[in-house]
Image (cartoon, rainbow, N blue to C red):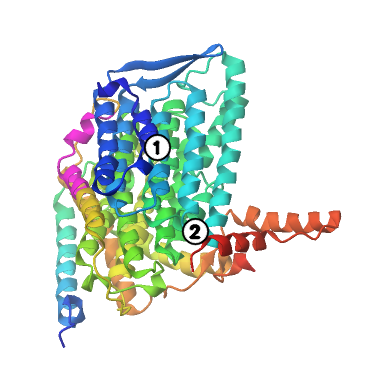
Amino acid sequence: MRDTHVFDKPENIKRLLTGFYVFIGLLIVLDLFISNHPVLPWERYPVFYGAYGFVAYVSIVLASHYVLRKFFGRNEDYYDQ
Amino acid sequence: MISSLPPAAVLILGAFLIPFLKGKAKSVYLLLLPVIAFVSVLTIPEGSHWTIRFLDYELVFGRVDRLSRAFGYIFTIVSFLGTLYALHVEEDGQHVAAFVAMGCALGATFAGDLLSFFSFLEVMSVASTYLIWTGRTSASYGAGLRYLLVHLFGGLCLLAGILIHLNQTGSIAFGTIGLTGLGSHLILIGLGISCAFPLLHAWLPDAYPEATITGTVFLSVLSTKVAVYALARGFPGTEVLVWIGAAMTVFPIFYAAIENNLRRVLSYSIINQTGFMVVGIGIGTALSLNGTVAHVFNNVLFKSLLFMSMGAVMHQTGRINVTDLGGLYKTMPLTTVFCIIGAASISGFPLSNGFVSKSMIMGAASQVGTGILWLVLLFASAGVLHHAGIKVPYHAFFSHDSGIRAKEPPLNMLLAMGITAFLCIFIGIVPGPLYSILPAPVDYQPYTAAHVVDILQLLSFAVLAFCLLILSGLHPVETKVILLDADWFYRKGTKLFYRLASRVLGTDREEPQEVVHGYEKRNVPT
């Protein structure tokens, strides 16, 4: 089939993800060796930024879809009714 | 020679010659106007120019200092890029309205007095309304009308505030105002409407997605950025702005997360980014104000790039909803790359322009109070990555294959996106030229090893969360939905008022909705 593109092949997605996980591992290792002269107390904890980014992302996705949409979501023709 | 004319006049007066030109001459002329305005901004000496006596007051059309000149660069650069992007548009009215609106943004920026600032702001609102109405759907008509009414209300607050301020101080000079009395509070509310303060913001995600594809690129930099300039001029160091700005960075990310229309996602994103700027103004230190101006400059580039890429998608496919798109990277690779560069920039990845400016505001915020503000802004940074960094490019160009095989947009659109993307990367790698135009001398180094690793961690782990949610099937599915926002009060409220008034007065006129449908029947080509 000619209409096959780079992400149509699962092995390419797997390669991309593997590279990304290696990069994440590298960031964790680097964090242990690079001192960031913390201004705020939280910055002293190892992988603080990573943990904060992960938790923030998950909470945004879950809160918006399961709380905000439930209370404030309406059909697309709501204002036309 | 060029500086004998104010930059605003170059665009506003120049716009009215557009209908008399045709073909290549018109294209060259359209691109030349912002270049002339840019050279004018570049060459005017600091000081007050083009002053006119009006009644007992002195109107100043050319107050040039480092703050106004920086904003002048921003508005002229985006005028050029937006015009290049819109070069294929044949309707002269759209070009004229865009130049008048951008000219008014320049006029407001260089206004040394509150009366001429107010006048430019109002004309800008009218020209912006035209860009919304030329979307020529019933939705764009309604949204444009609401936009105009909300901005006129904001204008009235501003005018009332200016008059009270004038009465109290005897001066219409536009300098530091500060929150000192009723007049200054009204001025702040008026600017707050233009700036999309929380609860005063709903006009923005209501109207911008309904404007023309090319008009939205201009709109995205107009009202909010002029208001940011005015806040930086009039209210630096006003503490309430810190928390107003912080709220602006947070609440839109939840709306943008669910929104189906990708141009509306970006509209909520404007409020989020403007929030960072407002925080910087509220903190009021040299670092934070520099950060605000730098972030305005960068935001104008990456936000217009994102709107351009979504406009290109809409132009080529006729669709803009998440639920209709996907897989476009296969046939629109260049647009995909440009969108990803815009997405990386707005997220603040190292080597992008967002990194070198947002970090200044974050650095200033870390020195305020107990660090709660800093945590809020860090949370908002993860939110930016979610809706603008991932959601926009992922759902338009990747995700599931929608089966749409649209081609790349016209060359002028690609060129505009290419130049804007280049600037995003260039400023990210070489921030020196940007830092050199900021209001205060800059002693700031964004590229320290620790800072790069910290930000990469924040963003990469957020991307990791996205990957894990998708792979595990836990990521909620995007659906066709609209979200109630603050405009509910006046959209439903006016209908209720109309019905009640009709009942009390015993009249039986057509419903407002029918008026809108009547407009649509008259104006939308079939």
Q: Are marks 1 and 2 on the same chain?
A: yes
**Depth check: B360 or B517 in front?**
B517
Q: CA distance from mark 1 to mark 2?
A: 23 Å
Q: Residue at x 49, y 36 (%)?
A: B123
Q: Count residues near mark 1 (Cα–Cα under 10 Å), then give few for <14, some for 14-19, many for 20+.
A: some
Query: Percent position (x, y) of residue B126?
Result: 51, 41
Q: Residue at x 22, y 73 (%)?
A: B330
Residue pointed to by mark 1 = B16
Report the label total.
2
Q: Considering only vertical position in the picture, is B99 above or below B504?
A: above
Q: Which mark is residue B24?
A: none
Q: Please, what is the three-letter code of the amino acid marked with disc 2?
A: Arg
Q: Please, what is the three-letter code of the amino acid marked with disc 1?
A: Phe
Question: Which structural element holds mark 2?
Answer: loop
Q: Residue at x 45, y 38 (%)?
A: B242
Magenta residues, dominant SS class: helix
Determine the chain carrying the residue at label 1.
B
Residue pointed to by mark 2 = B136
Question: Which structural element holds mark 1?
Answer: loop
Q: Considering only vertical position in the picture, is B405 above or below A33?
A: below
